[in-house]
Image (cartoon, rainbow, N blue to C red):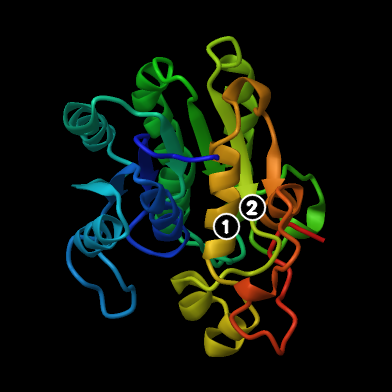
Amino acid sequence: MKTLAGKTLFITGASRGIGHAIAMRAARDGANVVIAAKTAEAHPKLPGTIYTAAKDIESAGGRALPVLVDVRDEAQVNEAVDEAVRVFGAIDVLVNNASAISLTSTLGTPMKRYDLMHGINVRGAFACMRACAPHLAKSENPHVLTLSPPLTLAPKWYGPHVAYTISKMNMSLLTLGWAEEFRAEGIACNALWPRTLIATAAVQNLLGGDEMVARSRKPEIVADAAHAVLTRPSRECTGNFFIDEDVLRSEGVTDLARYAMDASVEPLVDLFLE
């Protein structure tokens, strides 16, 4: 049976959304989860904090370590990784989930927003990898999973919101580079992206509200796909740009309707996919 029991996962942005769903799936196996996120107090539009996520994880059967981290801050990342190793003794999995989004044109993107996206999406992922890699190298089945899309040079994905697009593509380029750099050490480095919109705060608050949420899938589809990837042999599974539903089909899952927010409508295909 594929399981993450006893494994330690360092998940960025795990206080809500996809990161929280991945954490909960691991918790049901009995995993240790480091919740590396920057929400310590409840936000009126963003449900969940590192502390509520910790309670959820422990209720599901896992062990949780909530750590207040801004992934743009190297010192905070390093301290969080050190604390994770002190508490759990190891890091077996890094999930680069934290992300900022702004679907704006060049003139519509203030430099502060540009810096935020590239600081969280690219710098944050890189900083976490630098801090976690020495510990991952000691694991029996180390994995790095980055929530970013398959690489593309199709102009239609760059023209409308180039700043956001290049930040996500840079996350994918990191995956491509890491897969090669850490191949000899057996650290699997893969990317995962949803086929459809996922019902997260970003969809609710930025991409169209309730109507778009209804045409989305639940975060659990990404979590189940992530679990399938993270339990594969690391030396046999690296350098891939996975799509959630393709991963599940390869695992024998044929009924995807249970992941729909509203089974009466067709879910919308996500950005960067045809």
Q: Quadrant of residue 90?
A: top left
Q: CA distance from mark 1 to mark 2?
A: 8 Å
Residue 166 in sight: no
Above-or-below relation of 192 to 15 = above
> In the image, what residue occupies the spot 23% across and 31% down?
88
The number of discs equals 2
Q: Which residue is labeled 1 in the image?
A: 222
Residue 1 in sight: yes
> Considering the numbered disc 2 on the image, is that residue within a helix, a strand or a loop?
strand
Looking at the rendering, in which quadrant would you find the C terminus? bottom right
Dot 1 or dot 2, earlier in sequence: 2
- 172 vs 62, left or right, is right
Mark 1 vs mark 2, foreground winner is 1
- 149 vs 121, left or right, is right
Looking at the rendering, in which quadrant would you find the N terminus? top right
Residue 73 placement (x, y as % from top left): 28, 39
Q: Nearer the viewer, residue 65 or 250?
A: 250
> In the image, what residue occupies the spot 58% across and 66% down?
103
The answer to whether the residue labelled 1 contacts the one labelled 2, judged by CB atoms less than 8 Å apart, is no
Q: Nearer the viewer, residue 247 or 73?
A: 247
Residue 16 placement (x, y as % from top left): 37, 64
Q: Nearer the viewer, residue 268 or 162?
A: 268
Q: Residues within 10 Å of mark 1 (few under 14, many from 20)?
A: many
**Residue 183 has which mark?**
none
Residue 218 placement (x, y as % from top left): 55, 71
Which residue in the rendered view is the most extreme toward the top? 184
Q: Nearer the viewer, residue 98 or 22?
A: 22
Residue 156 placement (x, y as % from top left): 79, 59
- 181 vs 244, left or right, is left
> In the image, what residue occupies the spot 29% across and 68% down?
48
Amino acid type of the residue that numbered disc 2 sits on in the rendered structure? Trp
Q: Which residue is labeled 2 in the image?
A: 193
